[in-house]
Amino acid sequence: MFATIKRLYHQFGSPRYFYDMTGKMLPWLIAGAVLLIIPGIVWGLAFAPPDYLQGNSYRIMYIHVPAASLAMGAYVMMAVAGVVVLVWRMKMAEMVARSIAPIGASFAFLCLITGAIWGKPTWGTWWVWDARLTSMLILLFLYIGVMALNMAIENAQSAARATAVLSIVGAVNIPIIKYSVEWWNTLHQPASISMTSSSMATEMLIPLLLCIFGFYFLFAVLLIMATRCEILQREQRSNWVRQLVENN
Amino acid sequence: MGTELNPAAVNPAVVKPPSMAQGFNAMLRRDLVVAFRQRSDLVNPLFFFIMVIALFPLGIGPEPSTLQKIAPGVIWIAALLSTLLSVDSLFRQDFDDGSLELALLSPQPLFVLVLGKIIAHWLVTALPLILVSPVLGVMLYMDADTIQATLCSLLLGTPVLSMISAIGAALTVGLRKGGVLVAIIALPLYVPVLIFGTGAVEAASMSMAFGGQLAILGAFLILALAFAPFAIAAGLRISLNG
Amino acid sequence: MSELLLHVKGLSCERDDRMLIRDLAFDLHGGEILQIEGPNGSGKTTLIRILCGLSDDYEGELHWRGQPRHRNDDRFRQEHLYFGHLTGIKTSLSPRENLRWILQLKGVGERGPALDTAIETALEKVGLASYEDVPVYALSAGQKRRVALARLQVEPALLWVLDEPFTAIDRKGVAELEALIQQHASRGGSVLLTTHHALDIPGLRKLQLGLGGGQWALN
């Protein structure tokens, strides 16, 4: 078991192996994303029953909730990649971490936009300083900080290490920020309608789960594609990349 | 004449292994002396703090009830901005004159030196601002309890702000254009301190207990003291490596 | 032969996808002086920064006194002295305060008067006898450099790593520094330095770095 993990780690640590292997995995991941998201969305938008309180407007949840979960998950992943960068000095982890930030930021942004659209029929305004939306806004700011730092440092390796430190600090702070914002929210806005009802009918829940899993596949596809671009750019002087370019 | 201080001491075995307290004291004292020799660094954040707060009534109107309501937020945001302004110089000078390299290569653990530097920086830039905050509180029509809460929350909260911004400063010290970048990196991380800092002051202004908020700020301070110096040291190593 | 201090083998360094140093190997014993030479861009400063521990972007072996350096890092920090392009001298402090700070960081155990006399003697030797308490910003460029060079008089270290130490000092200062380097070597210490000066030191070894990383020569 441990030996297998170690072998996989070393194999995926080589940019060339990563590039070849993910090239083979990509079609399957794309298929997985399509097969999960399309039924999930169609089911959720067309067939799931309307909510007794919110009517049909809750259906944006099928995009909002997966986006929220990914935005958070991607940050944690970026921090884990950061640990690998700092502790094991793995070049591949540098490229993965660099690729995650814009994707995670996009999901955070998507979550905020869908939240605003959802907020209009529910609260009557585009923006409410709801605890979840506010936390997501700050998460987006954290992503922006990471991306700004990454862009500002020219040397790719220093940039990767500096952003690794920042994303780890950020990840440690996320629970503290979330807790603080919730506390602040109960202080200033007691009793607002929670957007997701705590108990959900099975007919609503299954498409939601399909969408969440589908979004994870979508995230994997995006991340792998971005990382492959990064590999080609970073390794452009190496022989195998040159051969790859010549053969195509 | 010192026993083994000349080049005769080619063999450094005679030198005692350094104590952490010695490195900490050396850094703290040197930075305090440097700060007192360059007094503009000492007073500028203070004037900034006072001016920002004085501008709020001019922008919003002198109505006591409005000012009372926004006072906690105004004082805290002004403190936060002035920390941010002064932090860019925290490592910049040492980076430019090379003493940061010496600190990094010295036998002292870097996080101890960093802690000394940040405490010196806090004493010089944040403490004066805390000391004048009661005067500004009076100008914003705060009552005695609220002023007391402001003082306590600033005392506990501003060191955390200094630590957080020092992480940003350490990561960007190798870059020529550090200023705005440090703000973008550090501002989102300020959120919990801002929330509980203003929370304490607000509770006091409504004559409620604010011990809980102060306790949480204290917890943040302990966390920051325990972990931030390591992140800052790592950041400095990375910045000097590149 | 005296003790083997620094042992370098198979040292390579890549920066921004460019091989700067390839497969470098040399040994430095106590009493030896090694001058690193090479045209601009040949990686002299990079090598110096790797050797003194500021940069860890290298592959290969780097041993200090018989052990991999990352394993006896504390000892190496205690036993070497780095003198770089930036001298680490604060202009708002006096020479005395600057040296005291550097020595305290190094963990020099002396306190108060003993430390002060040692610093005064060192400053006197570099020709700054009456300038101990003048702020460094009031000194000339050459004098500022001498304040930093006073470290060599007073800071205990086995290995000196000097990056362009002869910049901005006058002819007399160069001769004094040469003598000091030789004195350090004769006492069993060793010196690594980069300079464009033609040094007048008997027994000097040279490491010639070339552009492109591949070529280097030791003589």
Image (spheres, grey):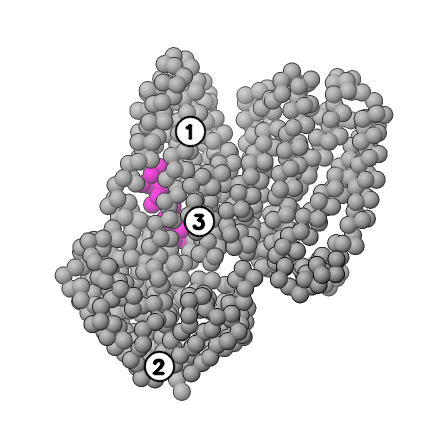
Residue A16 appears in the figure: no
On the image, the x and y values in percent for residue A50 come to 80, 20
Q: Which residue is mark 3?
A: B175
Q: Residue at point 39% right, 18% down?
A: B59
Res. C204 mark: 2
Q: In which quarter of the view is residue A171 placed?
A: top right
Q: Residues within 10 Å of mark 3 (few under 14, many from 20)?
A: some
Q: Secondary structure at mark 1?
A: helix
N-term mark: 3 or 1:
1
Circle 1: residue type: Trp
**Up/down of B50 relative to C155, above or below:** above
Q: Which residue is mark 1?
A: B76
Disc 2 from disc 1: Cα separation: 62 Å
Closer mark to the observer between disc 3 and disc 1 = 3
Disc 3 from disc 1: Cα separation: 29 Å
On the image, the x and y values in percent for residue A132 come to 62, 29
Horizontally, is A62 left or right of A181 in the view?
right
Horizontally, is C127 left or right of C109 in the view?
left
Q: Secondary structure at mark 2?
A: loop
On the image, the x and y values in percent for residue A229 come to 67, 51
Can residue B124 be found in the magenta stretch? yes
Which quadrant holds the N terminus of chain B? bottom left
Horizontally, is A128 left or right of B96 in the view?
right
Q: Residue at point 38% right, 49% down?
A: B91
